[in-house]
Amino acid sequence: MADIARKANAQWMGDLKGGKGNISTESGTVKDAQYSFGTRFENGTGTNPEELLAAAHAGCFTMQLCAMLAGDGHDPQDVRTEATCEMVKDGPGFKVSAMRLDVRGKVGGIDQAGFDKYVAQAAEMCPLSKVMQGNVEITHKAVLE
């Protein structure tokens, strides 16, 4: 039995290129967000699974990092993570090949070397980073402001 379980759902109607779908989350924060071939493989209006994965990873990682910093007495005044989910052609389809995290933080009581250490530790502790470890290249760029 899981300690925590979150749900989301997706609906798709039609073939790959001409079809369209929507994605919703259990909380209702994302409700019937439109996605299509154009939003996934081109630059159409709407969302796509890779964008949502990047958002989830950025949120999870940032929370983990701030929890660790605060737990050790540092003041995470403003920490921001930009995640870029990259895909490459893989045979007849595609695969997620990399997740690039650009972490910027205004944190009291820490220097760049210390911040780098916490970013590396958060990468090992973040639940979504753990899911991807060994499957997806994950890189971190940490800048203390």
Image: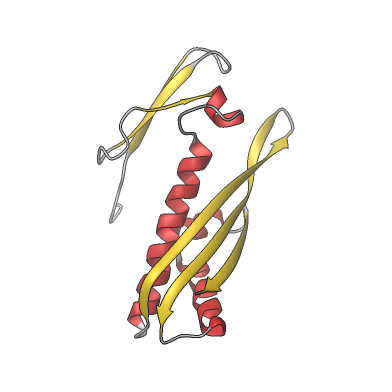
Q: Quadrant of residue 27?
A: top left
Q: Nearer the viewer, residue 90 or 102?
A: 102
Q: Nearer the viewer, residue 39 or 122?
A: 39
The residue sitting at the right extreme is 91
Question: Residue 43: x and y, percent?
Answer: 57, 30
Q: How many marks?
A: 0
Taking the spot 39% from the left edge, 76% from the top edge, the residue there is: 68
| Left or right of residue 15, residue 3 in this image | left
Question: Residue 103: x and y, percent?
Answer: 52, 65
Taking the spot 32% from the left edge, 40% from the top edge, the residue there is: 7
Taking the spot 56% from the left edge, 23% from the top edge, the residue there is: 37
Q: Nearer the viewer, residue 39 or 128?
A: 39
Q: Quadrant of residue 64?
A: bottom left
The scheme the figure's colours follow is secondary structure
Question: Residue 110: x and y, percent?
Answer: 46, 85
Question: Would you place residue 64 above or below residue 13 in this image?
Answer: below
| Left or right of residue 52, residue 24 in this image | left
The residue sitting at the front extreme is 145
Taking the spot 41% from the left edge, 58% from the top edge, the residue there is: 60
| Left or right of residue 7, residue 98 in this image | right
Question: Residue 118: x and y, percent?
Answer: 49, 77
